[in-house]
């Protein structure tokens, strides 16, 4: 089943940049449909034989050899509060690449690929009980579709401190004083926290938005406000509900009061495709998540003197 699913990925690439995203749908134990950005998916497999060490995290079902590399396998069902799938022979494995690392996620079943209108996606109401592991919900053929915040799950399994080298911190200290206020736009709570932590280490001030629509609204409000409250640089995720990073960049470039702003797109999706889209929508730089020194250097380079 995996190959026909992934062979259709190319038909969805044209959606990028138009606030639409291709989602791979899967289930974790009941009828509830979950989704993951298809561009983060490498392959879908039947659950392989897993090797487990006692010291592994409770959500890591084990590891296996994937194309010559040993990768961890996280039980996504268990992470989302469903019965574990580690010993379920009919379970499927979604192999993904996030933030330049490869890992597998156990799911109950894989459905199909669909395209979703970003403007119809919204943050889930807290009453739904998803917590921070779902960053958007929408309706698909009348049924609820929940988009998993994979970065949140990965951070829970393998939390990493944000570290900046002495070289970059020194560069930040000697840079000419000027407007050092950034707008950080990201739908992942983990990613927002990482970015704010990083930029504070560089003595940069942050304004935060959880999606492109909120970011654009903030920019327009701040641009007409006091000079010392205005933003010098936008650092935005790409895949977000309501308005994605490509659409946000286009909106900035089409607004006479905002088009002067530098825009850096920061995403767990990497590759040549993103580089081409960055140029097409008019962004100034693309940095793959999460490389603190490289991102910090790019931000310092783009900030006005």
Image: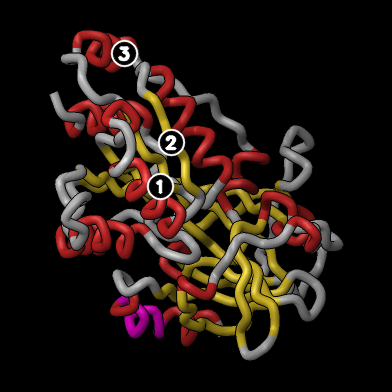
Residue 16 at x, y = what percent?
Answer: 32, 71
Q: Which mark is residue 207?
A: 2
Q: Going by the image, does 147 lie left or right of 212?
A: right
Q: Gap between marks 2 and 3, in whole Å?
A: 21 Å
Which residue is at 43% across, 73% downward?
Answer: 21
Q: Gap between marks 2 and 1, in whole Å?
A: 9 Å
Task: Characterize the local packing of mark 3: few (<14), some (14-19) or many (20 or more) Cα atoms within 10 angstroms.
Answer: some
Which residue is at 60% across, 48% downward?
Answer: 72
Q: Gap between marks 1 and 3, in whole Å?
A: 28 Å
Task: Characterize the local packing of mark 2: few (<14), some (14-19) or many (20 or more) Cα atoms within 10 angstroms.
Answer: some
Q: Going by the image, does 9 lie left or right of 111?
A: left
Residue 150 visible somewhere in the drawing = yes
Residue on which the image places disc 3: 169
Question: Is label 2 or label 3 in front?
Answer: 2
Region rendered in magenta: 7-13
Residue on which the image places disc 1: 218
Residue 175 at x, y = what percent?
Answer: 19, 15
Quarter occupied by the N terminus: bottom right
Q: Residue furthest right?
A: 83
Say whether residue 219 is magenta.
no
Magenta stretch prevailing secondary structure:
helix
Residue 272 visible somewhere in the drawing = no
Which residue is at 26% across, 32% downward?
Answer: 299
Marks 2 and 1 close (CB-CB < 8 Å): yes
Identify whether 94 is placed above or below 256.
Answer: below
């Amino acid at each position: 089943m995996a190959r026909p699913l992934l062979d259709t990925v190319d038909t969805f690439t044209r959606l990028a940049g138009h606030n639409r995203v291709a989602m791979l749908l899967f289930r974790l134990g009941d009828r509830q449909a979950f989704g993951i950005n298809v561009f983060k998916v490498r392959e879908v497999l039947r659950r392989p034989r897993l090797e487990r060490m006692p010291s592994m995290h409770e959500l890591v079902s084990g590891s296996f050899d994937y194309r010559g590399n040993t990768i961890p396998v996280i039980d996504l069902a268990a992470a989302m509060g469903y019965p574990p799938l580690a010993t379920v022979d009919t379970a499927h494995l979604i192999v993904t690449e996030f933030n330049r690392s490869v890992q597998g996620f156990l799911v109950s079943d894989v459905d199909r690929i669909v395209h979703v209108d970003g403007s119809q996606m919204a943050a889930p109401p807290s009453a739904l009980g998803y917590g921070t592991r779902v960053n958007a919900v929408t309706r698909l053929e009348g049924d609820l579709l929940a988009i998993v915040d994979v970065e949140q799950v990965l951070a829970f399994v393998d939390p990493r401190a944000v570290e900046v080298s002495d070289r970059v911190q020194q560069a930040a200290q000697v840079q000419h004083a000027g407007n050092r206020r950034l707008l950080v736009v990201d739908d992942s709570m983990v990613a927002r926290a990482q970015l704010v932590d990083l930029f504070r280490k560089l003595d940069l001030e942050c304004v935060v938005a959880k999606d492109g629509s909120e970011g654009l609204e903030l920019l327009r409000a701040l641009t007409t406000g006091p000079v010392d409250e205005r933003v010098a640089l936008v650092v935005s995720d790409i895949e977000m509900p309501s308005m994605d990073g490509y659409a946000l960049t286009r909106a900035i470039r089409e607004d006479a009061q905002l088009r002067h702003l530098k825009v850096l797109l920061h995403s767990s999706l990497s590759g040549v495709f993103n580089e081409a889209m960055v140029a097409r929508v008019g962004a100034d730089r693309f940095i793959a998540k999460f490389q603190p020194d490289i991102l910090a250097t790019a931000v310092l380079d783009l900030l006005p003197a």
